[in-house]
């Protein structure tokens, strides 16, 4: 079952992008994921691939992984949508995400629901305001 709008999460500051995204360094929190970090990483890596071939992303941290590892698609669980390389920010840099997303993952047993079809999710509208508002409120100043 997918949402009427997918909630965007995990997009980062780009000087040419024009959106109010945070820099991931502003959301680093070594204590956020706790003992669930590996499960969160697996969940983010296992989403359904949609919007492929967007062009490779790049890591916003100096010395980060090559662009190819950051991915060229978005992933979704039918409720949330995130860039393919989001897991790297959690795994390597301990970047914090909305607790609402973590609770959603936990409620799903840290498993993306089965039976989601990319062709049915490609055209679902995306709520960008949720991420913009959360990241504005939660970034370090």
Image (spheres, rainbow, N blue to C red):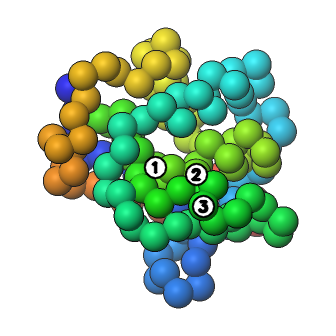
One can see residue 22 in this view: no
What percent of the width, then of the height, locates residue 99?
Answer: 57, 34
What percent of the width, then of the height, locates residue 29?
Answer: 79, 43
Q: Which mark is residue 82?
A: 1
Task: Name above or below for residue 33 compared with residue 57.
Answer: above
Q: Nearer the viewer, mark 3 or mark 1?
A: 3
- Residue drawn at x 71%, y 53% is 27
Q: Nearer the viewer, residue 70 or 39?
A: 70
Q: Are marks 3 and 1 in contact (CB under 8 Å)?
A: no
**Mark 3 residue element:** helix
Q: Earlier in the sequence, mark 2 or mark 3?
A: 3
The residue carrying pointer 2 sits among few (fewer than 14), some (14 to 19) or many (20 or more) residues within 10 Å by Cα, namely: many
Q: Residue furthest front?
A: 68
Residue matched to label 2: 85
- Residue drawn at x 20%, y 26% is 1
Q: Which mark is residue 37?
A: none
Left or right: residue 64 versus residue 107 is right
Q: Which mark is residue 68?
A: 3
Q: CA distance from mark 2 to mark 3?
A: 9 Å
Q: Nearer the viewer, mark 2 or mark 1?
A: 2
């Amino acid at each position: 079952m997918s949402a009427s709008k997918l909630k965007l999460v995990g997009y980062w500051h780009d000087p040419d992008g024009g959106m109010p995204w945070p820099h991931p360094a502003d959301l680093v929190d070594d204590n956020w994921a706790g003992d669930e970090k590996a499960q969160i990483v697996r969940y983010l890596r296992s989403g359904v691939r949609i919007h492929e071939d967007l062009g490779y992303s790049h890591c916003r941290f100096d010395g980060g992984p090559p662009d190819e590892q950051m991915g060229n698609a978005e992933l979704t669980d039918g409720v949330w949508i995130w860039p393919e390389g989001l897991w790297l920010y959690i795994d390597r840099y301990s970047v914090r995400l909305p607790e609402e997303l973590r609770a959603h993952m936990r409620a799903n047993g840290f498993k993306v629901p089965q039976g989601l079809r990319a062709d049915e999710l490609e055209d679902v509208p995306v709520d960008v305001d949720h991420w913009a508002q959360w990241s504005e409120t939660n970034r370090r100043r």
